Amino acid sequence: MRQSQLFTKTRKEAPSDEVSKNAELLIRAGFIYKEMAGVYSYLPMGLRVLKKIEAIIREEMNMIGGVEMQTSALQEKSVWAKTNRWSDDVVDNWFKTQLKNGTELGLSFTNEEAFSSLMKGFITSYKDLPAYPYDFKTIFRNEARAKSGIMRGREFHWKALYSFSRDEKDHNEFYKKIRQSYISVFDKVGLGGRTYLTFASGGTFSKYSHEFQTVSDAGEDIIYVDEAQGIAVNKEVLNDEVLADLNMSRESLQEKKAIEVGNIFSLGYKFSEPFSLTYKNEEGDNNLVYMGSYGIGISRLMGTVVETLSDEKGIIWPESIAPFTVHLISIGQNDKAQELYETLTTKGVEVLFDDRETSAGAKFADADLIGIPHRVVVSGRSLDQGGVEYKKRDREQGEIISVDDFVSQF
């Protein structure tokens, strides 16, 4: 893509009411546009990042048997009344509305009831199980106070998978697989070294659930990390009779702030029972379906990457989710740069070509702010020295290398 054709512009300052680092950098770099508190539009480069995160998650879910679909954002009152979660006394962050005929509707804030109701139409026999549907979806929550940029908004993008199993044994086998898949997701998006499998309260579902927490000063949660084991506990279960069951010693734990980037729950019969979601076993008896829930906030994950992988100059995208692989900058050498652009794109390399008529300093500052992993500069000086100036975003110094040597690494 030519940068001169990209309608977005970088900014020196973020909106004065924006205090989170992730939103400040993403707005300034032209990845998102703030519509209102807690609501952001994703601009072309921001959408590219979201789609790359989504693709990583899709690949991992499909590898363990997940089947992608799309559930409606409009939720009918009768479905949610079955579990009493339509009531504002139980869930206080619904966005609700009405059809012209008076029918009450809500904008989905989660998916347990929606999937349970839907799957009742497709599960009748043990032969129909297991089933692992999932979707990517915009979720709406009427938060009293939106904060933390795209990490906690009133509208956000997520992936939710629900498992439908014959019994707890089959469920536990899948649970282990998806737990490992989540670890792979966070490794692939560049957060593996600072993201911990964290034991947390299972609420009304089970004794424990598992969260995936990324250590960050911007985090809202407190976790206690066992570095030797690579696991952690949420503060909410620290004083539980937590710890002996989990084979963790208080002496080994370090307190850290962290951002929850994913969670997995054993739901048991919590939702299958009110929906009478049953199947006939081999003997013809009716049994309740055993369920699980597995969520990742995609926009939250994007914000977490920015919070943790950035410096004073801007964002440092991991190559796996960067909007482009190479930022090609022309300093008065558009013809030579065009040749390199065509060579790279022919090889399938994603390139942002800065062909704008502006100063070298402005181009370099924008490149650091946008954070594309590989920067290559074509200038009179570099050509005189036999090539192009190549620099990785996470390194201080660049080097002059030949065009062939640069191209050969992709």
Image (cartoon, rainbow, N blue to C red):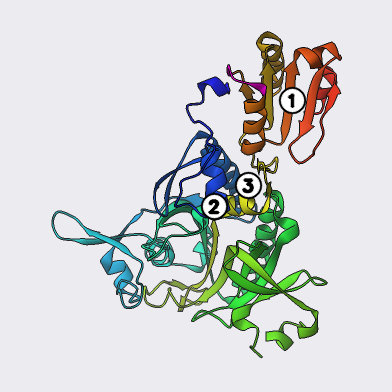
Q: Main secondary structure of the magenta part?
A: loop
The residue lying toward the viewer, choosing from 83 and 211, is 211
Verify CB contact (< 8 Å) between mark 3 and mark 2: no
Residue nearer the viewer, 21 or 58 = 21
Percent position of residue 367, x then y: 65, 32
Q: Which residue is mark 3?
A: 56
Query: How far apart are the two marked residues, 1 and 3, measured between alpha carbons?
Result: 27 Å
Foreground tag (1 vs 3): 1
The answer to whether 95 is drawn above or below residue 291 in the figure is above
Q: Which element carries disc 2, helix, strand or loop?
A: helix
Give SS at disc 3. helix
Tag 2: amino acid: Ile
Question: Label 2: which residue?
Answer: 298
The crowding category of the residue bearing disc 3, from other C-alpha atoms within 10 Å (few below 14, some 14 to 19, many at least 20), is some
Residue identifier under label 1? 376
Residue that extends furthest to the bottom in the rendered view of this protein: 241
* Mark in front: 1 vs 2: 1
Rate crowding at label 1 as few (under 14), some (14 to 19) or many (20 or more) other CA atoms within 10 Å: many
Q: Which mark is residue 249?
A: none
Question: What x and y, as percent, mark residue 55?
Answer: 59, 44
Q: Quick check: 20 above or below 351?
A: below
Task: Name which of mark 1 and mark 2 comes first in the sequence.
Answer: 2
Residue 121 found in image quarter: bottom left
Residue ID at (40%, 64%): 145
Residue 195: image quadrant is: bottom right
